[in-house]
Image (cartoon, grey):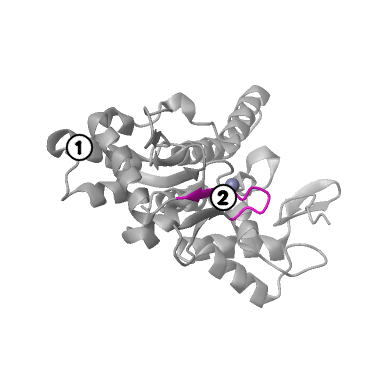
């Protein structure tokens, strides 16, 4: 069943023109102000549901994605000939808050229960669970029913494999280089706004306010698409530490917590670690991309 709306929430057609829908436009403004006041997407969607407002005809259910789509829709500041219902500065502030959220670092972890949280299947990427039976070595089993990849390894063997991969990292700290910029994708929102800006310049008939809104929206989207500076900073810090101190008994767990994003398990590949920049180090052989 498709609930896709023909025109974005907040607008309606009137005499074949798109105009703000008073009730919905007020709700859009309310959503932006709630988000900028620090409310979570979930909290806002609950609030919307409680208010009895309907996003779609036919159901008054709200979810986080609907709120997210509203907060990201640059039509609310006047792009693509839609009437402006949100102040561009509020729109930009909302995009900035989203960018800040993305930079929060993952929580720390220790012990085998902790590596369990990081363990994923080398074949399909699904979570791997540790399954212990009496008098047998732990089995790591892929939770994907179609895959069921299994690795049998002792807890000590698992830890030693991670330590071997970390020893490789100690020899090649360059593995913690940030990814090259060309590996990052241009977001579809940036492309859409660039196209609209070019088209608006060519039309030459747009108001300065509209052009200003577009340029602001594009700047906000480009800011959002910037590489994660806190990640680059973390990578550089880890690299410096490894170069100066090496990986020792004392700092090994801490470096592991900061540098490892996931641990890939597979029957063939054994244990590999994926660093926070996406590079993979196998505990078996030479590092690979
Ligand atoms: Zn799998």
Q: Is residue 31 above or below residue 81?
A: below
Magenta segment boundaries in residue numbering:
143-152
Could you say whether the residue bearing mark 1 is in a helix, strand or loop? helix
Q: Is residue 116 left or right of residue 201?
A: left
Q: Visible in this render: residue 249?
A: yes
x 56%, y 50%: residue: 126
* Residue 145 belongs to the span the image colors magenta: yes
Q: Residue furthest toward the top?
A: 202
- Mark nearest the camera among 1 and 2 is 2
Q: Quadrant of the C terminus?
A: top left
Residue 207 in the image: x percent, y percent? 61, 35
Could you say whether the residue bearing mark 2 is in a helix, strand or loop? loop
x 37%, y 55%: residue: 155
x 38%, y 41%: residue: 276
User: Depth check: 181 or 160 in front?
Assistant: 160
**How far is mark 1 from mark 2, CA to CA?**
31 Å
User: Depth check: 70 or 88 in front?
Assistant: 70
Task: List the residue tagged with mark 2.
Answer: 126
Q: Is residue 13 left or right of residue 151?
A: right
**Within-10-Å neighbours for mark 2: few <14, some 14–19, many 20+:** some
Q: Visible in this render: residue 259?
A: no
Q: Is residue 64 above or below residue 240?
A: below
Task: List the residue tagged with mark 1.
Answer: 242
Residue 153 in the image: x percent, y percent? 43, 51
User: Depth check: 26 or 271 in front?
Assistant: 271
């Amino acid at each position: 069943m498709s609930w896709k709306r023909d025109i974005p929430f907040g607008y309606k057609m009137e005499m074949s023109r798109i105009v703000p829908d008073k009730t919905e436009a007020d709700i859009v403004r309310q959503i932006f102000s709630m988000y900028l006041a620090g409310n979570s997407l979930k909290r806002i969607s609950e609030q919307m549901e409680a208010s009895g407002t309907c996003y779609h005809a036919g159901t008054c259910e709200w979810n986080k994605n609907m709120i997210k789509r509203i907060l990201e829709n640059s039509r609310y500041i006047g792009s693509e000939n839609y009437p402006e219902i949100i102040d561009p500065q509020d729109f930009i502030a909302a995009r900035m808050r989203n960018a800040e959220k993305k930079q929060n670092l993952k929580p720390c972890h220790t012990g085998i229960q902790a590596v369990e949280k990081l363990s994923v299947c080398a074949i399909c990427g699904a979570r791997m669970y540790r399954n212990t039976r009496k008098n047998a070595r732990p089995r790591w089993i892929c939770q994907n029913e179609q895959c069921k990849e299994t690795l049998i390894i002792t807890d000590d063997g698992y830890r030693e494999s991670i330590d071997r991969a970390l020893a490789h990292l100690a020899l090649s700290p360059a593995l913690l280089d940030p990814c090259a910029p060309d590996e990052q994708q241009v977001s579809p929102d940036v492309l859409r706004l660039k196209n609209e800006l070019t088209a608006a310049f060519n039309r030459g008939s747009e108001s300065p306010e509209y052009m200003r809104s577009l340029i602001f929206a594009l700047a906000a989207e480009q800011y959002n698409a910037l590489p994660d500076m806190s990640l680059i900073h973390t990578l550089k810090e880890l690299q410096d530490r490894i170069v100066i101190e090496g990986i020792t008994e004392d700092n090994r767990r801490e470096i592991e917590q900061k540098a490892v994003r996931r641990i890939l398990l597979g029957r063939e590949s054994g244990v590999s670690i994926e660093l926070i920049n996406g590079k993979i180090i196998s505990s078996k052989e030479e590092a690979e991309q």
